[in-house]
Amino acid sequence: MSTEPEKKIDEEKISDVEEKKSDAEEKNFDVEKKNSDDKKILDSINEDGFKSKIGNFFDGISLKYVLTVAGGALFCVLVIGAVLFFADSYTTEPIKRDIAAVEEEKRVHVKITGGMSTGEIADQLEEKGVINSSLKFRILSRLRGYDDKMKPGTYIFTTNMSYEEVFIKILSGEKYIVTLTIPEGFDVKKIAERLYESDLADKEDFLKAAKDFTPYPYMKKHKNVLFAAEGFLFPDTYEIESDASVEEILKLLSDEFDRKLTPEMREKAEQMNLSIYDLTILASLVEKEVRYPEDRPIVAQVFLKRLQMKMPLQTDATLQYLMDTPKEDVSIEDTQINSPYNTYQHNGLPPGPIASPGLESINSVLNPADTDYLYFVADRSGHNHYATTYEEHMELVNQYR
């Protein structure tokens, strides 16, 4: 029986053991070397050296961190800026827009006051539909260096404007003079419409301010009055700066009314036991009821006489004031409207003026005609016909209406 295989196996086992022993010795050598290196490092570090090296380590980490973050942030800003730039360039509409685009435009008034931040301006523009992204506006402004260059003022934008067009307006401080004409007999709502058409003010902003605007004692708001400023905004032609605020416009018009009301006129009203407030109400009624100058003092006399006799004024003008759309003729149903302004249902004057009277109407109240008329009716051309009795009046109504 041969022993060669067994001998060969024993030799292989011995070889494996020796190899493992060699590996173990090599590992022990590496550990001893590492420990020796670590000991040398520890032995070589004194307190100052340790602090210095640790400090340099963290300095290096901090610098790398800062550079990494800054680089990343700069890259993001550049990418966002590039995207916004190309997006803005792509979506900017040409100055000559097609008819469909123009028809879709809606004028929007935006007021920028001193001290407003870019964010506040952007939010207001987005809220009113001028831009579709407040964030985009702020980023573009920051990238282009516009943040501290936007000028205060009241601006007119449209909902179809590009960001570039919006910036041009705000940066230029666009300002010009507007000639505004307010005809006699305009009420606050019509004045608001005229201001909007002239690109001077937002209608809703003006109406809101007019509700409680009382710069003079005689304008004190009375119960049930719709607009405290009604009747006291003098009808005339004005030169108004385009950036004038709603409050400035209201003051300009009311100051003119106060100037037109001379000391002699005030004294005459006092002699007639008329307050300036009541004088203005009466003048506004005359203004709305009369188309031709010669009728003013006669109609004023009819109103004054009815008040003295405690008869209802029964003027259609006060009913028309309550309607969104005026009618050529009021109906019996209209005379049943439940309102303090309904002079068919309530004796005396309405709560407040119903329009802005001109000087001729004011003077007609201060200098009424001397007649016995108590009734009048206007024909289709606007001429009034007068009567002293109700029967005569009804005959005139049947004849001319």
Image: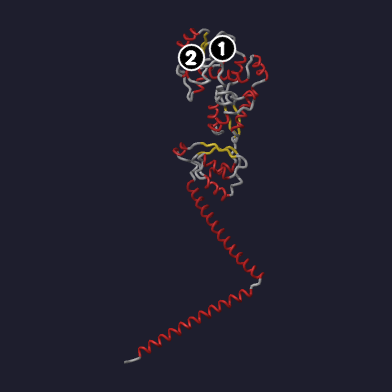
- Foreground residue among 214 and 167: 214
Residue corresponding to mark 1: 310
Left or right: where 231 falls relative to 390: right
Amino acid type assigned to the residue bearing label 2 in the image: Asp
Q: Crowding at label 2, few (<14), some or many (≥20) Cα neighbours within 10 Å? A: some
Amino acid type assigned to the residue bearing label 1 in the image: Lys
Residue 306 vertical position relative to residue 254 in the rendered view, above or below:
above
Residue 301 vertical position relative to residue 53 in the rendered view, above or below:
above
Element under disc 1: loop
Q: Quadrant of residue 304?
A: top right
Of labels 2 and 1, earlier in sequence is 1
Q: Is residue 294 visible?
A: no
Residue furthest out toward the left:
1
Q: Is residue 397 visible?
A: yes
Left or right: where 182 falls relative to 3: right
How far from the left and from the top, in percent, is residue 354? 55, 22
- Foreground residue among 305 and 177: 305
Q: Crowding at label 1, few (<14), some or many (≥20) Cα neighbours within 10 Å? A: few
Q: Quadrant of the image for the C terminus?
A: top left
How far from the left and from the top, in percent, is residue 362? 60, 18
How far from the left and from the top, in percent, is residue 14? 43, 86
Distance from Cα at disc 2 to Cα at disc 1? 27 Å
Residue furthest out toward the bottom:
1
Residue 67 vertical position relative to residue 12 in the rendered view, above or below:
above
Q: Quadrant of residue 48?
A: bottom right
Residue corresponding to mark 2: 379
How far from the left and from the top, in percent, is residue 396? 48, 10
